Image (tube, rainbow, N blue to C red):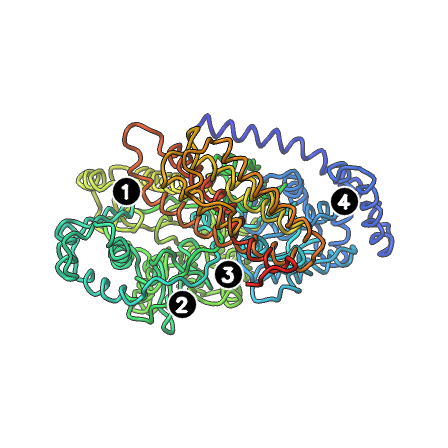
């Protein structure tokens, strides 16, 4: 570990040494820039744009561009970029991650690469963790960009397509990652290029990059429509499973969150529904509902994974404690939770389009990001996104004291210490921010604070604007604030002058998070820009994180522990143990993300082909050519299917071929019986003649615009419908993924091969549908033909 840290430090040192040379050059331009009038400074943008248009790389003009932005910022915002902020900007322009501590001014850092890359005229996306931050940065930094002659857009949900298009056409666009991703999916469902809102994805800066590219990466972006799955069944299955017990009707494995129905559980359902065997194929939908109802009751927790509000189940982001507006669990789980909580069960959704967070962001030609906590995930950033992490030094020396965690034997002992610590600091007026991992834990702890007579503010499930406003007050005298670990991320906490003399803001973490990065973010709420501050985690081995650790190993360790009279574990070294648990749990999440990515990479390759095919359809101006290409492919497949031998000897093969040809060409000049005992080449000659006559008819319609439009629409609708069905098929392949490890074969390879076969079938079906369905359109437009 020590050698690894030395290597990382040496790598960063060499990189920083290289970048500091550019910082020196930028600083040397400061006096020259300061001497320019406002008009002369504004003209710099046009001058730099012209250089780029002439073929000069933006990387070759970075020093002049950065100096321009710094001077404009001084005049417009009253803010001068520090040298370390210039360093951060230099990391971002080359497609890296700048790790900068909380309070180092990452929002201002982003203006430097945004301006430089905007000179290319291909669009810059600045991606924030929530819409409140997107609006705030758009309004504040927009003034700077407008002064320099650049246009700025804001892309948020609930705005019209026209407004979105304007936002994307701006030089720099602010918004959230999910909204950018959903727009990509929606753009690939339009019936014309003109309806699209996005330009090709060129350059992105992701603020809080670890939250967006890693924490949110286990949840794919999905656009869905209503499906016909029966919702009433969830009420019945939920009523039955609510009385089930672990070890009797089901077995639950907390470390993997896997749940298995036992023979006893299956028998109860068979008796309830009058079935002989629950696992028969005809009962597949019922079994699916049962398992989702079990997950709803056993795995999903109210006020941790979701809250109930106004007859709605609303998802809670486990990493931020925020409500995930407009998001639902998929595959019937949301409906199962609705039944469990007794609210109205809404219709299930069927996936129309989806993409993982990883594969969305890998579309950008250049990707970069900023955060205060990237180093623990340095390996994952590089392997998944090819992003290198560079730790940027702080502008002022860090004065925050991070005390060693205290580990207690049980929850009650932990809470007693937390209350004691809060009382101690509150007595002298020092502000305290208490971080929890869930809404449930916040509310539970609030009861103990009330009992102790401590006045506090609680922050959970509020609007983003309230969140930022409340968290910004955490540095005031006598303030005690109770919140989820990530509340107010991106918002500065300003200390009262008197608070500095008391030691600054004190942070208490009540549980270790499943990711060390989140703990780093909580600590980072204190000690900004050289401010004093301190942090301490006060935890117990009854905390949720230990439920994800191996139970037998946990029990063995518990037998060894020794505590003092307060319940504090003194031996064996508890800190070493809990950090080991956190590392293992975090490794499990990395494996889960990697697993998801490997599976989605298969679909992603197919998605690229489908989207490219869709683009070709939208650009196509010759529908006759579309039909001809589909027809050639389908006829070839059909011929080989029914004529594998040199002579057709069986009537069934002749009947099958005849029926297929009838569906394509209509009435035929021969009967099925005429094909029996014919040589393969003779049959091919008959089909070739049918094809030639048919093509001659189609070509007479090439100049008919209505014909062109209807054929294009038919092809688009077929592609979209078939893609939805294919994605469902790929999802079914995934569901059986785990059992494919038997036989010592690579399950990922098997999934890839099976997925490839399904995709070939999908493409073949597209040609078959087009060949048969286009006949009706052709008949409609041919002169003298009977209109259907």
Mark 2 near mark 3, Cβ–Cβ under 8 Å?
no
Q: Where is residue 582 in the image (x, y as percent from the top left)?
A: 35, 42
Is 459 placed left or right of 202 in the picture? Answer: left
- Which mark is in front, 2 or 4? 4
* Residue at 62 percent of width and 49 percent of height: 617
- Kindly identify which residue carries mark 4: 65
Q: Do the residues labelled 4 and 1 touch (CB within 8 Å)?
A: no
Instruction: Label 2, secondary structure: give it.
Output: loop
**50 over 195 or under it: above or below:** above
x 48%, y 47%: residue:
356
Q: Mark 2 points at which residue?
A: 456
- CA separation, marks 3 and 4? 36 Å
Whole-percent x, y for residue 470 in the image = 50, 66
Residue position for label 3: 475
Q: Distance between the residues labelled 3 and 1?
A: 36 Å
Please tell me which of labels 3 and 4 falls first in the chain. 4
Looking at the rendered structure, the secondary structure element under dot 3 is helix
Q: Can residue 104 be seen in this view?
A: yes
Q: Within the image, what quadrant is residue 748 found in?
A: top left
């Amino acid at each position: 570990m020590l050698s690894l840290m030395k290597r990382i430090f040496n790598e960063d040192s060499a990189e920083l040494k290289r970048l500091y040379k550019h910082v020196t050059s930028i600083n040397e331009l400061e006096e020259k820039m300061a001497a320019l009038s406002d008009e002369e400074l504004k003209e710099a943008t046009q001058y730099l744009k012209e250089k780029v248009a002439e073929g000069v790389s933006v990387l070759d003009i970075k020093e002049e561009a950065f100096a321009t932005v710094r001077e404009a910022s001084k005049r417009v915002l009253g803010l001068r970029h520090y040298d370390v902020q210039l360093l951060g900007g230099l990391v971002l322009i080359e497609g890296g991650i700048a790790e900068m501590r909380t309070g180092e001014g990452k929002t201002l850092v982003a203006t430097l690469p945004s301006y430089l890359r905007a000179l290319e005229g291909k669009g810059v996306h600045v991606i924030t963790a929530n819409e409140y931050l997107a609006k705030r940065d758009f309004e504040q930094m927009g003034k700077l960009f407008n002064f320099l002659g650049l246009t700025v857009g804001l892309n948020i949900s609930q705005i019209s397509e026209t407004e979105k298009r304007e936002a994307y056409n701006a030089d720099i666009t602010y918004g959230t990652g999910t909204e950018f991703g959903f727009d990509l999916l929606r753009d690939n469902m339009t019936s014309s290029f003109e309806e699209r809102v996005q330009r090709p994805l060129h350059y992105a800066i992701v603020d809080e990059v670890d939250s967006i590219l890693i924490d949110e990466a286990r949840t794919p972006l999905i656009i869905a429509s209503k499906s016909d799955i029966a919702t009433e069944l969830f009420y019945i299955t939920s009523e039955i499973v609510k009385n089930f017990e672990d070890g009797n009707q089901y077995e639950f494995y907390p470390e993997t969150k896997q749940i298995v129905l036992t023979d006893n559980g299956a028998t109860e359902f068979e008796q309830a529904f009058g079935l002989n065997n629950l696992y028969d194929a005809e009962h597949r939908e019922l079994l699916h509902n049962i398992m989702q109802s079990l997950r709803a009751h056993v795995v999903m927790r109210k006020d941790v994974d979701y809250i109930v509000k106004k007859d709605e189940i609303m998802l809670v982001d486990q990493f931020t404690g925020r409500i995930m507006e407009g998001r639902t669990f998929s595959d019937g789980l949301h409906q199962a939770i609705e039944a469990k909580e007794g609210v109205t069960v809404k219709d299930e959704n069927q996936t129309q389009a989806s993409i993982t967070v990883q594969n969305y962001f890998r579309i950008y030609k250049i990707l970069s990001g900023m955060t205060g906590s990237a180093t623990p995930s340095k390996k994952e950033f590089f392997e998944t996104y090819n992003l290198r992490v560079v730790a940027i030094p702080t502008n002022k020396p860090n004065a925050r004291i991070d005390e060693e965690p205290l580990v207690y034997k049980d929850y009650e002992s932990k809470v007693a210490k937390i209350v004691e610590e809060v009382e101690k600091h509150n007595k002298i007026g020092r502000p305290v921010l208490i971080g929890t991992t869930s809404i449930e834990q916040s509310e539970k702890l609030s009861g103990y604070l009330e009992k102790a007579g401590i006045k506090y503010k609680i922050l959970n499930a509020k609007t983003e604007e309230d969140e930022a406003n409340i968290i910004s007050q955490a540095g005031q005298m006598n303030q005690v604030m109770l919140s989820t670990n990530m509340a107010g991320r991106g918002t500065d906490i300003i200390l009262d002058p008197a608070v500095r003399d008391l030691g600054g803001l004190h942070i208490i973490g009540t549980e270790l998070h499943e990711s060390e990065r989140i703990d780093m973010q909580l600590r980072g709420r204190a000690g900004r820009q050289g401010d004093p501050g301190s942090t301490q985690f006060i935890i117990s081995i009854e905390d949720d994180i230990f439920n994800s650790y191996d139970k037998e190993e946990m029990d063995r360790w518990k037998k060894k522990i020794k505590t003092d009279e307060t319940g504090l574990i003194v031996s064996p070294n508890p800190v070493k143990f809990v950090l080991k648990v956190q590392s293992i749990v975090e490794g499990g999440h990395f494996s889960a993300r990697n697993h998801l990515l490997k599976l989605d990479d298969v679909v992603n390759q197919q998605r690229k082909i489908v989207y490219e095919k869709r683009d070709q359809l939208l650009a196509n101006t010759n529908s006759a050519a579309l039909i001809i290409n589909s027809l050639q492919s389908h006829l070839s497949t059909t011929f080989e299917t029914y004529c594998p031998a040199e002579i057709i000897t069986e009537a069934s093969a002749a009947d099958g071929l005849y029926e297929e040809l009838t569906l394509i060409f209509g009435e035929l000049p021969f009967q099925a019986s005429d094909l029996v005992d014919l040589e393969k080449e003779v049959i091919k000659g008959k089909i070739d003649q049918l094809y030639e006559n048919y093509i001659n008819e189609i070509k007479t319609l090439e100049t008919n615009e209505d014909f062109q439009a209807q054929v294009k629409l038919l092809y688009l609708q077929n592609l979209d419908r078939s893609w939805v069905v294919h994605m469902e098929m790929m999802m079914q392949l995934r569901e059986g993924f785990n059992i494919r490890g038997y036989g010592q074969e690579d399950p990922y390879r098997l999934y890839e091969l099976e997925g490839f076969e399904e995709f070939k079938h999908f493409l073949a079906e597209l040609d078959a549908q087009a060949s048969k369905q286009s006949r009706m359109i052709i008949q409609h437009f041919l002169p003298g033909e009977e209109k259907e």
